[in-house]
Amino acid sequence: MSRIRDLSLAPAGEMKINWAARNMPALRLLEQQFEREKPFAGLKIALAVHMEAKTAYLCRVLEKGGAEMFVTGCNPLSTQDDVAAAVAAGGIEVFAFHGCTMAEYEDCLCRVLEPGPNIIIDDGGDLVHLMHTKYRELIPGVIGGCEETTTGIHRLRAMDRAGELLFPMVMVNEADCKHMFDNRYGTGQSVWDGIMRTTNLIVAGKRVVVSGYGWCGKGVSMRAKGLGAKVIVTETDPVRALEAVMDGFEVMPMREAAKIGDLFITVTGCSGIITAEHFETMKDGAILTNAGHFDVEVDMAGLERIAVQKYDARHNIQGYVLPNGKTLFVIAEGRLVNLAAGDGHPAEIMDMSFAVQAMSAKWLAEHRDGLRSGVIPVPREIDREVAEVKLRAMGVEIDRLTDEQSAYLGL
């Protein structure tokens, strides 16, 4: 039985899901295909992805394909209660509510695994981790799974290197139609949407410090520049740092950026990016946000320890007064700002990411007897098909190679 906040919120959530579905043409096409073919007939799918409108539509598409769905969120603050209610009202088992404690969050994860999933769709690796630590007896029934995000891929690769990953996991995040668009354009827009609606402050003229210049960091920096900010990038990878310089951004260590930044956005997927040594040198009024999956990039525990006062400065913004008299502001408790303080990526972007997810899950079901344990790339044909569907939906035509050109290129 579902565990949600309030079933009466379902009509508001249904409106959000309908709007998202209207703007997700690739998933709509898959919905029709799955309803005809039933690729998941007889299979159970456990899903842990940010429980908002686009995810809800993905759940319904998979259900149309014959799957028995058990779904939850992948972050205690990213679930939208009205959307969770709408999904539950439609008959899917949902275990998610906004603002749950860490114990409640883990309980929700456990509830979607206990029925014994055949396919796992994960965002950040929490479901896979629990399967290998708490539910190992259920692993023989797992065909495989799909991982949505960079942080989850890091965790899977570590498990694979150690020989600990006991079933196949498709690296959805590394598909071109995921990371090149979702991470860059989706994160780039949704992070600023969350920051601007939460703070109601101008971006133009501010020094914005972006930590990490991967695909997400590139998107956040590009949009900051477009909004008129003076962008500073911090990096540990010399190649990415050089790329940031060539893209026209200042690059410096965090110890120097901390002194001059007005607004900080961590997007590294690593821990301990902004710590006590940085807090003490920051400007009065500096704003700290995190756009990485877990709330470990800004050292919130360290900030709590050194602060002499903590208060609610605005909805979803907390002020921390330091011993030196300066106040630092943190958005959404240091959790994923574009979802904990916004609606996540635009529907058109998640259309591509979730089309890759759905098609990868279908590919797993179709190839269940010949797959090895470990990390697996998304088949190239899935990337190409998603891109072609998306282009058609946008009214864009492209050239095709002639037979002679294909022969010339050795294809």
Image: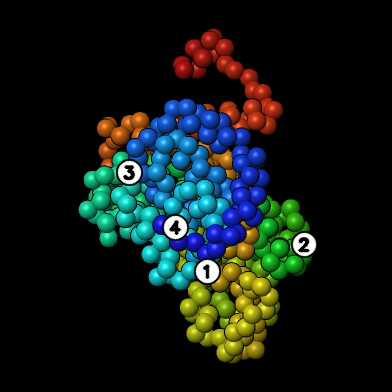
Q: CA distance from mark 3 to mark 4?
A: 20 Å
Mark 2 or mark 4, whichever is nearer to me = 4
Q: Give the residue drawn at x 38%, y 64%.
A: 107
Is there a contact, CB below 8 Å, between mark 2 and mark 1?
Answer: no
Q: CA distance from mark 1 to mark 4?
A: 17 Å
The disc at residue 139 is none
User: Which residue is identified by label 3?
Assistant: 118
Residue where numbered disc 2 is placed: 204
Q: Earlier in the sequence, mark 2 or mark 4?
A: 4
**Residue 227 visible:** yes
What x and y, as percent, mark residue 103? 40, 70
Q: CA distance from mark 2 to mark 4?
A: 45 Å
**Badges 3 and 4: C-beta atoms under 8 Å apart?**
no
Give how far across and how far down residue 246 sits, in percent.
63, 49
Q: Which residue is mark 1?
A: 99
- Secondary element at tag 3: loop
Q: Amino acid at mark 1?
A: Gly
In percent of the image, x 58 and y 63: which residue is there?
Answer: 340
Tag nearer the camera, 2 or 1: 1
Residue 309 lies, with reference to residue 133, above or below; the image says below
Q: Earlier in the sequence, mark 1 or mark 4?
A: 4
Cα–Cα gap, marks 2 and 1: 32 Å
Please tell me whether mark 3 or mark 2 is closer to you in this view: 3
The span from disc 1 to disc 3 (Cα, nearest Å) is: 29 Å
Position of 225 relative to 391 (above/below): below
Q: How far separated are the C-alphas under marks 3 and 2?
A: 49 Å
Q: Which residue is label 4 attached to? A: 2
Image height check: is 375 above or below 232? above
Q: Nearer the viewer, residue 237 or 116?
A: 116
Q: Residues within 10 Å of mark 4 (few under 14, many from 20)?
A: many
